[in-house]
Amino acid sequence: MKHYFFLGLFFIFSACSFNKLFLQPTKLSPSTKKIRLAIESDTSYVYFDSTSFFQPVFLSKKNDTIQTSYKITSFSFKSLSGNILNGWLLQSRTVKQSATLLHLHGNAGFLLSQYQAMIPLLDLGFQAFVIDYSGFGFSEGKATRKNVLIDVNSMLSYVKTRSEIKNLPLVIYGQSLGGHLSAVVAAQREADIDALVIEGAFSSHKDIAAVGAKFLGRIFVKEQYSALKSIPKFHKPVLIIHSKEDEVIPIKLGKKLFDAANQPKVFYEITGAHIQGTDLYADSIASKIKLMIGLK
């Protein structure tokens, strides 16, 4: 009897451990005012104005404001999860926006460590809305797989109310865990978006768990929702980007998603580390997205 009791505990704790691997947020206190950034040999800071939805201001080590080529407008909204979420609207200071991206970031960090993936696309005609899911950064609540899916659906509903997107194509761009989420939301909200971009994503929770833990991953991980099951329900243009050198999420999982997607679809195989597509191939990615949504 004792043997079965401890075996049962092993299964319970192993299941909990596996499922916690999917979300590893950096949580900030609402009282956080400044964060130090080490950038190569220099140092700068980000000051957060808590009176303006935690609006970020970039400062040099001499406390001078750093002027970036883009502007950030911080905002907040209430998710159907019940949590107030923090987000940023990213726009070029010099180039007119011709399309809007909803960026869904990965499973770790928070906006400050994730938003730069969209910066190379801003001067190519895109604006980007980025948010922190529940339990990330300044966003309220707990980071759970249930909450993040609710949050992304709420984000889409909120963004649809913003005047900045009027008459512009709207594209979901998900990376890593956000790429997995993007397929699920795209299938649920096809009428609200024009195209889907997925970079460096896994096909299902069980598939990525099995990469490291083999059959145990499939046994212990709860699926809840699956990009692989969702993407065949989406019937608008799809671009899947994946590096053949990705050591975090194998390219075979990206190809598995691609095989399940409907036409029109494009698989863009790149090189480089996990979700470095916009850093290394911004021009090509921008061109492919514009082609999908009928822009020159």
Image: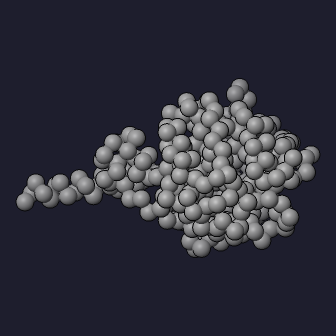
- Which of 233 and 206 lies nearest the eye of the viewer? 233
Find the residue positioned furthest to the left.
1
Q: Quadrant of residue 85?
A: bottom right
Residue 59 in sight in this render: no
- Which of 144 and 161 lies nearest the eye of the viewer? 161
Above or below: residue 42 compared with residue 94: above
Residue 156 in sight in this render: yes
* Picture coordinates of residue 91, whole percent (x, y): 83, 51
* Picture coordinates of residue 150, whole percent (x, y): 57, 68
* Residue at x 20%, y 58% (from the top left corner): 8
Find the residue positioned furthest to the top.
41
Visual colour scheme: one colour
* Picture coordinates of residue 27, whole percent (x, y): 56, 54
* Residue at x 87%, y 53% (from the top left corner): 97
Q: Is residue 128 left or right of residue 295?
A: left
Q: Is residue 93 left or right of residue 29?
A: right
Q: How many marks?
A: 0
* Residue at x 86%, y 64% (from the top left corner): 167
For the N terminus, which image quadrant? bottom left
- Which of 254 and 53 lies nearest the eye of the viewer? 254
* Picture coordinates of residue 196, whole percent (x, y): 67, 54
* Residue at x 71%, y 32% (from the top left corner): 280
